Image (cartoon, coloured by chain):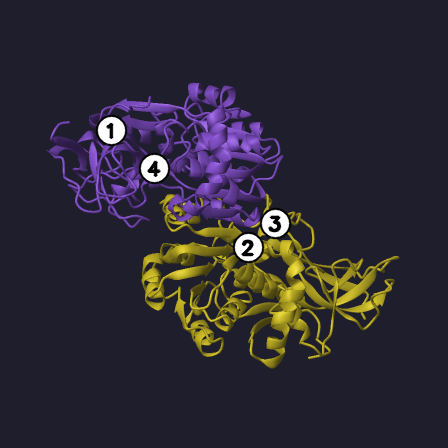
Chain colours: A purple, B yellow
Amino acid sequence: MTDTMQRIVLAARPQGEPKPTDFRHESCPIPTPGEGEMLVKIIWLSLDPYMRGRMDDSKSYAQAVQIGERMEGGAVAEVIASNLPDFAPGDYVSGSFGWQSHAVSDGVLVRKLDPKAAPLSTALGVLGMPGITAYVGLNDFGRPKAGETLVVAAATGAVGSLVGQLGKAYGLNVVGVAGGPEKCKYAVDELGFDACLDHRAAADASTLRKQIAEACPKGVDIYFENVGGKTMEAVIPLMNVHGRIPICGMIAWYNAGGPGSAQNDGPDRLPKVWRTILVNRLSLRGFIIFDHFDRYPDFIREVSGHVASGKVKYRETIAEGLESAPQAFIQLLKGGNFGKQLVAVSPDPTR
Amino acid sequence: MTDTMQRIVLAARPQGEPKPTDFRHESCPIPTPGEGEMLVKIIWLSLDPYMRGRMDDSKSYAQAVQIGERMEGGAVAEVIASNLPDFAPGDYVSGSFGWQSHAVSDGVLVRKLDPKAAPLSTALGVLGMPGITAYVGLNDFGRPKAGETLVVAAATGAVGSLVGQLGKAYGLNVVGVAGGPEKCKYAVDELGFDACLDHRAAADASTLRKQIAEACPKGVDIYFENVGGKTMEAVIPLMNVHGRIPICGMIAWYNAGGPGSAQNDGPDRLPKVWRTILVNRLSLRGFIIFDHFDRYPDFIREVSGHVASGKVKYRETIAEGLESAPQAFIQLLKGGNFGKQLVAVSPDPTR
């Protein structure tokens, strides 16, 4: 064990797309855990679109990361020293440990992991925050009924891929939207989607809309919204009466810099969308998974067995080394990942 | 009784704001009711913002009125001849009789009225479609809790005035938005709103927002949306976490002619609104009252006594004569009415 640790801090607030220089790699001494604390060594760092919001200074559901402060993020780690009765060296844990190689933690909101039950990395993906986001969004706010049609944006992403697979298990017609032919093929061939459309191949929202309409001859009952942008614009006019739109993200707009930036130029699409909400009596529900962790036991009960048996599939994109995190995150915001984006911060001893 | 009747038909589809020439006044013989039909003479015609939508050819929740076809609308009438067992001459009824002086009806969806229980005209306002819209929207989709803050657009309109009064009865802080000082004063002094802001006096949405924010120091939990436009743009950023937005109208945009028309010029406000829905975990619910007539008994049970006792107040703007309906409707879309807009088609014998 070296005496220094690595971490990545926010160097500057991004204007639009983050650049490598918005991050800074730092070394510092490994801290000693105090009373009621433990020291963990990070194995897997999770990269998630929501992190883009933390880089801005505007009001959001969580506080912004300050300039010079370590980037936040969920991670899987091994306990290497502990002054906590519930955690011992050698334990595997998941928690919000941040973009760094080591972390001191008081154990609050830290969960112990059983590496025999599922690969450690799944605690950050299909059995972690993206997984429960898919589960709660589809069940609680999508309210699916067998035979209905579900459209899933970012269909092969960490959230979307589980949304679609759960949708198929519930007897829905599931149509995905993803970026590129490889992802679309995977959604249909491996994940079992009925169809998947390539938003990159569609010149504009109305072209994409025509393709989605063909794949959804009975209209769209549930649109699982986690991207915004062109996909959202394509799907909303196809919503059936009493349709439901759970909204857990809008990655297409995360880099938008507010009015005046390119993404906010006219025309103003709000009146049309508002009219569709009214005329088709839609239910829209924004949700942040942190409000719904009480659903965790139900989620694990339903999904963990399917992951163990291979019925529910997942895919990971792994960036090697903490120093690769900024570039991997920049790519993630452009859809450069395929499935769950992870950073291998140190070797996984169970893999 | 004359042998001819009057009616108003759609002469042309309006481009933006309707003009008088978009309507045509016609005379025709009074029809004779056949078997299973009755003939009614219209007393009160209701004018409602939703009628603007019926004048367009685009997809909506109800079929468009065709060119040359009589304008649709709810009305109160007296039965003057009947081949229906449940209706007799002299009965007062409400139904969708249209913009005309007489109507033949099969009695379906026609309701008998007791003129002793409440003035006949209230069947088109506070005890009719606008009233139940207020009741269902606030209770079922607003889900109010005492102590919360409610903002009501079109505060002195047929819907908004009941929303606000019910809100006060439920222990909410109620802030209205209305057009002009007279309406604002009425909302506070007569209807009991805690405050009411004049959207006409506010230069833009952000000025209006500052005023609403001052009147809502604890933020906004429920925004009862029936106007869209500047008011909506002002309120949405003030919504509290887990806020609710029942949407039953968007009068400010009814005259919008689609992308390219003045109201749809940029900037595109959709990304900002979408972000607020997500970050503040808002519930938006479009609703059309025709889906919720099963709530009518509950509504009447709760509200009719309050109307009879004077606890719930209402106000009417009356245009004289069927021929005045087009101009009154054009004014209604600009907020020219004060309370429920009615047309006195023939004298009310009970008034």
Q: Which residue is mark 3?
A: B12
Q: Which residue is mark 2?
A: B18
Q: Which amino acid is tagged 2?
A: Pro
Disc on res. A325 = 1
Judging depth in this view, the residue of A270 and A120 nearest the camera is A120
Residue A245: image location, x then y, percent:
49, 42
**Do callouts 3 and 1 point to residues on the same chain?**
no
Residue A239 position by quadrant: top right
Residue at image position (81%, 63%) is B39
Q: Nearer the viewer, mark 1 or mark 2?
A: 1
Q: Chain of mark 2?
A: B
Q: Nearer the viewer, mark 2 or mark 4?
A: 4
Judging depth in this view, the residue of B142 and A136 nearest the camera is A136
Q: Which amino acid is tagged 1?
A: Ala
Local crowd size for mark 2, using a 10 Å CA cut-off: few (<14), some (14–19), many (≥20): many
Residue B176: image location, x then y, percent:
44, 67
Q: Is residue A69 left or right of residue B151?
A: left
Q: Which amino acid is tagged 3?
A: Ala
Q: Which residue is mark 4?
A: A112
Residue at image position (57%, 54%) is B52
Residue at image position (76%, 61%) is B103
